[in-house]
Image (cartoon, helix red, strand yellow):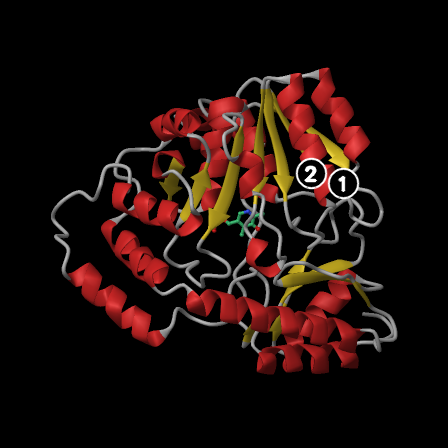
C-alpha cells in the first residue's frame, strides 16, 4: 500500500488543517514568539534543579499535578478544586474544544490566535469569526448576535487580545460573558496569556460560574516557555469535567518542581513585567518618528507595526539580525509585523534596524 492510501485513513478535518505556522530562524535578536527576553532567574534555576533532584524520577508524578494545582490556587486566591493544570495552555485550548466544540460552534474574532482556529478545524467544530472593528476593538453587538443565535459551543474572549495587543473595554467583555450565560450552552473562555502587561484581570468574571474558564500560562511573563505549563481557573464542577479530558500524569515531575519554585518567588515577574511595559512605551514613542511605519498601542509584551510591504520589512529586519513575526495575511493586518519587546539592548537594535528601513520596506 502506498503512503497516500494509508493517509486516506486520516480524518478529512485533520488533513484539511494546516500545520501550526512556525519556522525557526536563528538570529541574534529573537522577537517572534512573545517570550520573556529574560531567562528564569539563575538562583531560582538552581533551587528548582535541587527540587527536581530531590524527587523520584522512576515514579509517576501526581495524577493531576494536585500539589501544583493547590499552589496555583493559593497564588490566585482560587479554590484548588477549580484549577486544571496542563503542559501549556495550548493543551487546554484543545481540551476545551473537545469538551464543548466537537460538532458544535467555536466563536471567536478575526484576526484571532491561530490555535483556536486550528483546534476547531481539526475537531470538526463550526468556526464563526466576527471581524474586529478597524481600531481592533471587539464588535460586541456582532458577537452578541452570534451568541443569541445560540450554541452550544465555545466562545473565546482574549484579553488583552492577540495578535493585536488591544485591551477591550471591560463593559464589553462583561456584556459578552453575560450574553453567553444568558443564551445558554456556551462555555466562555477568557484567555489571559498576557494579563501581567495590561493591568486587567478577569478572574472575578469566572468565579462561581460553571460556564466560564480563565486560561493563564507560565510561558510569557513568568519566563518559563521552555517548561510548558498552563492552567485553567473555573468552578470545581467544570474543572471535574475538564480534568477528565487531561491524559493521566500529564505534567512531568521536573516541570512541577520548577513551577513550584517559581510560585514561591513571584516577585521577579512583576518587576520584569513593569520593565517590559516601560520598554513598550519607549519603543512605541520612538517609532512615531518612523517615516513609513505605523506602530499600534499595545497592552501586551508585543505590538503590531504596519509597514508598506511586510515581506520586504521582514527580510530587511532579519538581515539586520532582528526577527519579528509576519501577520500580514490576516484580516485587518495587511502589511503588519508583530514584534515582541526584548531587553532594552535588543529593543535598541530593533529600533536602529527599523529606522534604516524606509522607502520600500
Ligand atoms: C502565548 C499564548 C498562549 C500560551 O500558550 P502556552 O501553550 O501556555 O505556551 C495562550 N494564548 C495566547 C493567545 C497566547 O498568545
Are the residues tagged 1 and 2 within 8 Å (C-beta)? yes
1 or 2: tag closer to the N-terminus: 1
Cβ of disc 2 within 8 Å of ligand 1?
no
Q: Quadrant of the C terminus?
A: bottom right
Cβ of disc 1 within 8 Å of ligand 1?
no
Q: Which residue is mark 1?
A: 138
Residue at 54% x, 31% y: name it: 212
Residue 350 place in picture, x, y as percent:
67, 77
Query: CA–CA distance between discs 1 and 2?
Result: 9 Å
Quadrant assignment, res 60: top left
Can residue 15 be seen from the camera position used here?
Answer: no
| Mark sitting on residue 173 | 2
Determine whether, in the image, residue 257 is placed left or right of residue 270: left
**Tag nearer the camera, 1 or 2:** 2
Relative to 146, is 112 above or below? below
Residue 308 place in picture, x, y as percent:
85, 64
Residue at 45% x, 28% y: name it: 7
Residue 162 place in picture, x, y as percent:
65, 50
Of residue 121 and residue 236, the one placed in the foreground of this image is 236
Quadrant assignment, res 319: bottom right
Amino acid at each position: 500500500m502506498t503512503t497516500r492510501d494509508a493517509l486516506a485513513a486520516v480524518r478529512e478535518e485533520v488533513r484539511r488543517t494546516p500545520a501550526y505556522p512556525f519556522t525557526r530562524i536563528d538570529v541574534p535578536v529573537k522577537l517572534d514568539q512573545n517570550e520573556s527576553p529574560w531567562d528564569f532567574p539563575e538562583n531560582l534555576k538552581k533551587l528548582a534543579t535541587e527540587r527536581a533532584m530531590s524527587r523520584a524520577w522512576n515514579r509517576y508524578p501526581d495524577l493531576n499535578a494536585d500539589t501544583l494545582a493547590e499552589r496555583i490556587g493559593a497564588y490566585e486566591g482560587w479554590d484548588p478544586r477549580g484549577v486544571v493544570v496542563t503542559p501549556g495552555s495550548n493543551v487546554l485550548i484543545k481540551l476545551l474544544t473537545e469538551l464543548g466544540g466537537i460538532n458544535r460552534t467555536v466563536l471567536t474574532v478575526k484576526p484571532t490566535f491561530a490555535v483556536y482556529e486550528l483546534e476547531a478545524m481539526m475537531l470538526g467544530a463550526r468556526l464563526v469569526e466576527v471581524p474586529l472593528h478597524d481600531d481592533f476593538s471587539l464588535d460586541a453587538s456582532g458577537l452578541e448576535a452570534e451568541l443569541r443565535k445560540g450554541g452550544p459551543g465555545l466562545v473565546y474572549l482574549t484579553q488583552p487580545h492577540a495578535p493585536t495587543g488591544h485591551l477591550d473595554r471591560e463593559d464589553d467583555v462583561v456584556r459578552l460573558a453575560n450574553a453567553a450565560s444568558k443564551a445558554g450552552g456556551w462555555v466562555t473562555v477568557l484567555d489571559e496569556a498576557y494579563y501581567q502587561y495590561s493591568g486587567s484581570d478577569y478572574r472575578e468574571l469566572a468565579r462561581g460560574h460553571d460556564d466560564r474558564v480563565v486560561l493563564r500560562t507560565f510561558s510569557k511573563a513568568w519566563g518559563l516557555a521552555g517548561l510548558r505549563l498552563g492552567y485553567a481557573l473555573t468552578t470545581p464542577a467544570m474543572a471535574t469535567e475538564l480534568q477528565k479530558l487531561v491524559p493521566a500524569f500529564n505534567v512531568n515531575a521536573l516541570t512541577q518542581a520548577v513551577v513550584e519554585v517559581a510560585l514561591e518567588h513571584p516577585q521577579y515577574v512583576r518587576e520584569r513585567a513593569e520593565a517590559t511595559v516601560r520598554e513598550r512605551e519607549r519603543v512605541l514613542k520612538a517609532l512615531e518618528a518612523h517615516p513609513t511605519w505605523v506602530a499600534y498601542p499595545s497592552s501586551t509584551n508585543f505590538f503590531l507595526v504596519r509597514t508598506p510591504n511586510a515581506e520586504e520589512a521582514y527580510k530587511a529586519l532579519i538581515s539586520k539580525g532582528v526577527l519579528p513575526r509576519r501577520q500580514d495575511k490576516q484580516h485587518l493586518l495587511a502589511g503588519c509585523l508583530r514584534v515582541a519587546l526584548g531587553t532594552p539592548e535588543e529593543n535598541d537594535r530593533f529600533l536602529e534596524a527599523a529606522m534604516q528601513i524606509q522607502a520600500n520596506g
